[in-house]
Image (tube, rainbow, N blue to C red):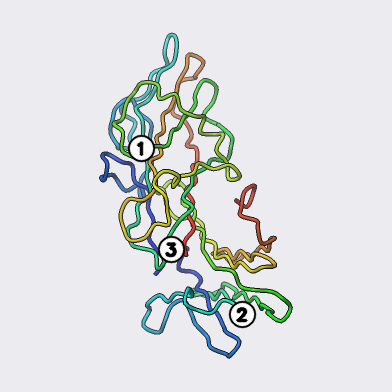
Amino acid sequence: MAATVQIHEMTGSASGVNKTSTTVRFKSADNTSADTDHRIAIPDSGTTYSYTKMLRFYFASAPSVDIQNLRAYTDGSNNFGTGIGVQYAVTSAWTANVNTDISGTNLFTATSSSPIDLDKLNTGPHTSTGYKGDFLRLQMTVSTAAASGLLTAETLTFAYDET
Amino acid sequence: MEPNQYYQWEMELDDGTVRRQYGDDGRECTWKDLPLERIVRVSFLPRVPLLPPHHAIIDPAAGERFVRRFARGKLRQGGDGIRLREYVNCLVTTRYRLWSYHDGRVIVTRPDYDGGGRNG
């Protein structure tokens, strides 16, 4: 059968939570629960940073030959509203989650024609089961210009090529 | 059934030999050991009702060659989580790429087109 590919929210170098049946939510706490606890406060000055999220590909079943060309992208439009952004970085290894500025790249600059390369550091072709490719580190930023309230979700696409 | 199981490929050689992705026992086969220059037909066959089959004839006598077949999976977040939402089988020849979507759509592009834009 074709491979079963999942996205996991990582909690360690080789452990994570399968996000097949739940979402990823930015919070002011370091946990993977998709609930409304630990909301991110709008600052009186400067910027508030969420705890980072580390996402990675996981092959629950192996491809018949291999998988490569792992990547991620947005639709290029940030609809979270004024004063709210998401920045990203790509790492080859697990990095502990922090709520300080990771000085990353604007996530919404990654589009289908200019995606984030997620097997640039941990290169493919990838075979067998387990965690594959690079870690995608995400962080929400909230400035004084943000409006309060629950945000509408944005969509991040993860793509791969299977042989 | 997941989108990556809606279609399977089938390839035919110039001597009539046919290989299908899934054998009678359900095990997945590879095309990697086939003589690529002798592949004259590639089909994407539905494994669920109501989807159309797609066939491409390759003409080696006219200089056309099979290059490779791959599939592109796309996972997106929805209300039920981050799941496989789209799966596209792709035939690459020296003349074109044929992209067969899991919902039955087909797009033909130039052979070096690799996504991006609206269809990325």
Say above or below: B14 vs B53: below
Q: Are marks 3 and 2 in contact (CB under 8 Å)?
A: no
The residue carrying pointer 2 sits among few (fewer than 14), some (14 to 19) or many (20 or more) residues within 10 Å by Cα, namely: some
Residue type indicated by callout 1: Met
If the image is split into quadrants, where does the N terminus of chain B sit?
A: bottom left
In which chain is the residue bearing label 2? B
| Position of residue B83 in the picture relative to residue A130 (left or right) | right
Callout 2: helix, strand or loop?
strand
Q: Nearer the viewer, mark 3 or mark 2?
A: 2
Callout 3: helix, strand or loop?
loop
Q: Who comes first in sequence, dot 3 or dot 2?
A: 3
Can you give x and y, in whole percent of width and height, for residue A11 in the image?
27, 39
| Position of residue A76 in the picture relative to residue A9 (left or right) | right
- Residue at position x 51%, y 57% in the image: B86
Residue placed under numbered mark 2 in the picture: B41
Residue placed under numbered mark 3 in the picture: B2
CA–CA distance between discs 2 and 1? 43 Å
- Residue at position x 28%, y 30% in the image: A30
Can you give x and y, in whole percent of width and height, for residue A132 in the image?
36, 51
